[in-house]
Image (cartoon, rainbow, N blue to C red):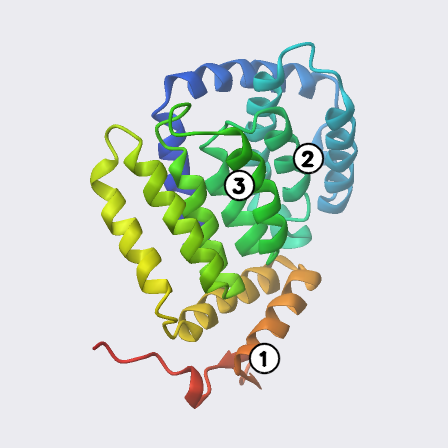
């Protein structure tokens, strides 16, 4: 989970840098405290019971009228997700199965909440091994945002492209995503200098490069995270993807299932 943790803290730093998000966070903290007063202590619940209780609460929240406070609900839900994500013992017992519910609420209530999409990609696409669902939720922001609305709107296309490369192997789709990343960055003051790099990435992807080694590494991380978290569905999905790539399944001395790269999956030498 090292890679996921790094992405998590990078995202937190980005969120903290925006005053508008800070305002939502403060309001959310107050709301969380009020909400907790109405709930039994989660310390008295097993991880499975706490998971079910949270699922029910998210289901109710998704149907609750916002009365014009959609941004507040999205920010509050995001703070709850951070607490959920950071509860390592619970996640080891139940996995990250509620992540889609959190981000369904966040992206419906406030699809312009740019900073949340990094976490969406990291958990739904990578840790849960559901890149198709991650891209579907991410599309809500792409359909709503523009470079004029948010200076980092281009990052949605970037995360989309990375998921398409690493987990789906969709090079044509990734090339189009990086085309749009470059276009939106060009239209954004302060990020124009990065646009040529994004366009170079798009052009490179159109040369149909060998990326199976990169995808092997990405799905290996998904498999490890799912195994440690007890998420059988995600583990099985990662196993299928690894075998499809040509990985060799073995059992080590500890009785653990591991995957090693076949000759066709060896890391390509630098040219």
Residue at x 36% of width, y 72% of height: 209
Query: Is the residue 226 above or below the residue 178 in the image?
Result: below
Query: Is the residue 181 above or below the residue 81 in the image?
Result: below
Residue at x 56% of width, y 75% of height: 242
Image-based side of 66 in relation to 190, left or right: right
For residue 227, the mark is none
Answer with the quarter of the image where residue 18 lies. Answer: top left
Q: Earlier in the sequence, mark 3 or mark 2?
A: 2
Q: Which of marks 1 and 2 is nearer the N terminus?
A: 2
Q: Nearer the viewer, mark 3 or mark 1?
A: 1
Residue 192 in the image, given as x and y percentages of width and height: 24, 36
Query: Is the residue 251 above or below the residue 210 in the image?
Result: below
Give the labeled residue for mark 3.
86
Dot 3: element: helix
Q: How crowded is mark 3: few (under 14 residues within 10 Å), some or many (20 or more)?
A: few
Labelled pair 1, 2 in contact (Cβ < 8 Å): no
Residue at x 68% of width, y 43% of height: 98
Along the viewing direction, whichever of 28 and 75 lies nearer the viewer: 75
Give the labeled residue for mark 1.
243
Answer with the quarter of the image where residue 61 lies. Answer: top right
């Amino acid at each position: 989970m090292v890679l996921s943790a790094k992405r998590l803290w990078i995202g937190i730093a980005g969120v903290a840098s925006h005053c508008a998000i800070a305002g939502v966070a403060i309001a959310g903290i107050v709301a969380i405290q009020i909400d907790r007063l109405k709930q039994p202590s989660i310390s008295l619940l097993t991880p499975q019971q706490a998971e079910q209780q949270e699922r029910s609460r998210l289901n109710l929240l998704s149907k609750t009228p916002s009365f014009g406070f959609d941004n507040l609900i999205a920010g509050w839900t995001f703070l709850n997700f951070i607490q959920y994500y950071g509860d390592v013992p619970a996640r080891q017992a139940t996995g990250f199965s509620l992540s889609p519910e959190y981000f369904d609420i966040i992206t419906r209530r406030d699809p312009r909440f740019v900073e949340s999409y990094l976490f969406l990609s990291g958990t739904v696409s990578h840790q849960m091994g559901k890149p198709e669902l991650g891209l579907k939720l991410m599309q809500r922001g792409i359909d709503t945002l523009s470079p004029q609305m948010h200076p980092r709107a281009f990052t949605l296309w970037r995360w989309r492209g990375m998921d398409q490369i690493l987990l789906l192997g969709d090079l044509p789709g990734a090339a189009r995503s990086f085309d749009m990343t470059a276009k939106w960055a060009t239209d954004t003051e302060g990020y124009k200098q990065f646009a040529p790099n994004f366009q170079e990435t798009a052009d490179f992807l159109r040369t149909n490069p060998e990326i199976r080694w990169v995808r092997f590494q990405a799905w290996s991380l998904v498999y490890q995270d799912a195994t440690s978290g007890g998420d059988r569905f995600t583990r099985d999905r990662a196993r299928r993807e690894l075998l499809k790539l040509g990985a060799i399944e073995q059992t080590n001395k500890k009785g653990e299932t591991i995957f090693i790269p076949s000759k066709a999956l060896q890391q390509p030498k630098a040219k």
